[in-house]
Amino acid sequence: MSTTVLVINSGSSSIKYQLIEPEEGVVVASGLVERIGEDEGLLRHTFEGVDTRLTEPVPDHGAGLRRVLELFAEVGPDLGAAGIVAVGHRVVQGGARYSGPALVDDHVLADIEELIPLAPLHNPPNLRGIQVARDLLPDVPHVAVFDTAFFSDLPDAAATYALDREVATRYRVRRYGAHGTSHQYVSRTAATVVGRPLEELRQVVLHLGNGASASAVAGGRAVDTSMGMTPLEGLVMGTRTGDIDPAVIFHLSRNAGFTIDEIDDLFNRRSGLKGLSGKNDMREVHGLVAAGDAGARLALDVYAHRLRKYVGGYAAVMGGLDVLSFTAGIGENDEIVRAEALSGLEFLGIELDPARNAGRMSEPKVISTDRSRVTVLVVPTKEEQEIARQVIDLV
Amino acid sequence: MSTTVLVINSGSSSIKYQLIEPEEGVVVASGLVERIGEDEGLLRHTFEGVDTRLTEPVPDHGAGLRRVLELFAEVGPDLGAAGIVAVGHRVVQGGARYSGPALVDDHVLADIEELIPLAPLHNPPNLRGIQVARDLLPDVPHVAVFDTAFFSDLPDAAATYALDREVATRYRVRRYGAHGTSHQYVSRTAATVVGRPLEELRQVVLHLGNGASASAVAGGRAVDTSMGMTPLEGLVMGTRTGDIDPAVIFHLSRNAGFTIDEIDDLFNRRSGLKGLSGKNDMREVHGLVAAGDAGARLALDVYAHRLRKYVGGYAAVMGGLDVLSFTAGIGENDEIVRAEALSGLEFLGIELDPARNAGRMSEPKVISTDRSRVTVLVVPTKEEQEIARQVIDLV
Ligand SMILES: Nc1ncnc2c1ncn2[C@@H]1O[C@H](COP(=O)(O)OP(=O)(O)O)[C@@H](O)[C@H]1O
Ligand SMILES: Nc1ncnc2c1ncn2[C@@H]1O[C@H](COP(=O)(O)OP(=O)(O)O)[C@@H](O)[C@H]1O
């Protein structure tokens, strides 16, 4: 009998799940519940190439997960027969405390709750997901895998803001990062692909999805990352500003009369690619650029400029660069962004091969030339498989 | 008869001035008025090696400048005999409009006033200084020299935040930079020192004073800079955070109950070196480090880490680096910071010469080895001489 892990990502109005064979990283089944709490919920379950879609009210997360378990029973696979040994839960904020996955107990639940002020949008639904899953699947261990864990032991020089220490300590202000599971998976996979020991490599990982983050990974250990106390800092994202003078907030508060909540919404949901071009989806940005749209061209220029700055900055932090990997929706599929992000970086020893860079990738692939000093890769991220792997290592 | 320019820097409670022979950059006389509006004001005037110090009430900027002119008459030099041909005024914020010095007329005054929302602490006293100086010295032209001018034509990719365009346009949110006169002077002087055409060089300038900023200068033109819409963004400073996740403001507003004004004060006046170590003066930070203080050690580490990130980032923005210059109080005097800022950057072709780097410098000096691919310099900044030079070029 095979061994499987059920990986759950519980959001404010959705539950995404995958049933995974962790050894091989095979996804046996997957699905999602959306619009929880709305008039009509959506359910989707995929098993053996068959897509089941349902529309029905899903009042809360408990009802949603109960329906998911019914779908497993009705459509398959049977969870018992599938050898489910654990449930892995993605949790966004683990603070400075969790440097790896944690077997869920009351203490861990209390910690996740206690960290809500640092991730007010994410930790509450993550917590809810764990609670309902434990009720419905009480016989297997549940494991929390934190998005921040890979960055929990960043060097102090990278993790510390130049802020009053008392305020920072009291309100727990530091760089926690995010997308850690992806950066960890990609940097480890990249070492395998280039066939060199992880311990020897200075790597930059560019995770470019709707959210986007860069990390510097030296010897397998994260030494810097672009997301900060929250996922707002760093690269230009689909709808987020990334780096911006914090005094812009003071300025807009005083001169535009915006409230903090309005500025939060503006920076997190109406900025980034969307703020500059009107579109948060990079494919649509390219469409506008092709049609001669100046705002979209500017969006792409600002996006690539920020990426170059981070690549150079992280090379400096590590004293050099050996491997650079692109991942996530844009990183895996967008040859234009990959080329623009690295243009002018020949002085770092980066030489992209245009033919290798062409196209979308679903498997790890080298896209630099053979003589490029830095090996540039596309490594499709597999956060759920990485969660399953970490879970199986723990239980 | 010599030709001189009176350079005035008018702050909220102070007026600093220098009488300069612009051709040679000779400072004929200098001084300052402090504590304007307080019970006791301070005046200091230096001419021919003689320091005159006075303590007396100085009710306002007009009274202050009147006393300065009296000191010129009493102590010397006589302004008429000194051949004063113009007055140059430092103005912090010139917006995107002023790419060079401007002969002051009602239109320029209106512009400086109109830009107050972007520099609420600086433009009002700058404006006041111009007004009282024009009243008292009506027979010479007055010239405004803007701190932002050198950065007014940054490439759009560097000047634009990934913010909603309508909001950005309406409230004029963009990167204006600051310390422009210093970055311009230092980058031009550096080209002379290395004996190569400015047009050919890719330079980084690190202006490290109480305020601190980095710039990337390619072919004599600024292509990026670390200060943003305001001087809060970028490097770690004496009392300012520099770069920080903007969401820290939302967090402190919600969880600490701080007002915007309190957070502004916290970020601008109680953070940076002071926030981390208790001391905003780098000499005192070193003193604490020597005594084994962990907070001071952390402050220095965060300071140097940020610098390395910017040096690498700006090399990437320019596609390489030829010359790097240190300037201002810390840059000119602090060999430890210079060494730590560049440690690990050998891969960029930077090789510091420890003997050349030792000590404080009052003249431009090469501090890299002869075989270093990047020439590293200390170039003492002379903002007032640069202002005088720009003024004389204009009038
Ligand atoms: N073929 C493609 N070319 C360019 N961008 C693409 C392509 N396919 C997907 N993307 C982009 O990937 C982004 C979403 O990435 P993804 O990793 O799925 O995001 P999330 O952060 O939501 O997991 C979108 O901006 C989308 O436009
Ligand atoms: N010998 C020195 N060693 C280290 N730092 C010094 C030295 N002399 C001055 N400084 C530092 O220079 C900084 C002030 O720089 P300065 O350019 O005068 O500032 P600003 O013009 O921005 O007010 C202070 O942090 C001070 O400690």
Image: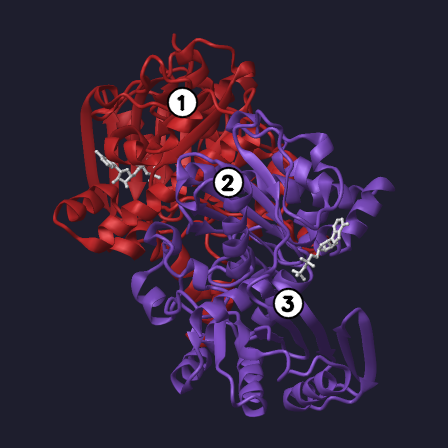
Chain colours: A purple, B red
Left or right placement of residue A355 versus residue B187 in this view: right
Q: Residue at x 67, y 90 (%)?
A: A66
- Report x, y in % for residue A93: 48, 70
As drawn, A210 above or below A143 = above
Image depth: mark 1 or mark 3 in front: 3
Pick whichever, B272 or B17, lies toward us: B272
Instruction: Find disc 2 in the rendering and name its residue.
Output: A195
Are callouts 3 and 2 both on one chain? yes
A90 relative position to A318: left or right: right
The secondary structure type at the circle numbered 3 is: helix
Res. B385 mark: 1
Q: Taking the image as four quarters, which one is ligand 2 found in?
A: top left
Q: Amino acid at mark 2?
A: Gly
Q: CA distance from mark 3 to mark 2?
A: 44 Å
Number of the front mark, 2 or 1: 2
- Confirm whether circles 2 and 1 share one chain: no
Amino acid type shown at disc 1: Gln
- For the residues labelled 3 and 2, say whether their Cβ atoms are less than 8 Å apart: no
Above or below for A129 versus A364 = below
Query: Does the image show residue B175?
Result: no
Mark 3: which amino acid?
Asp
Q: Position of residue A6 (x, y in %)?
A: 60, 76
Q: Are marks 1 and 3 in contact (CB under 8 Å)?
A: no
Tell me which chain the residue with mark 3 is part of.
A
Mark 2 touches mark 1? (CB < 8 Å): no
Q: CA distance from mark 1 to mark 3?
A: 46 Å
Left or right of B290 in this view: A72: right
- In-front residue for pair A60/B316: A60
Question: Residue B216 in the image: x percent, y percent?
Answer: 51, 30
Q: Secondary structure at mark 1?
A: helix
Q: CA distance from mark 2 to mark 1?
A: 57 Å
Instruction: Report the residue marked by disc 3.
Output: A265
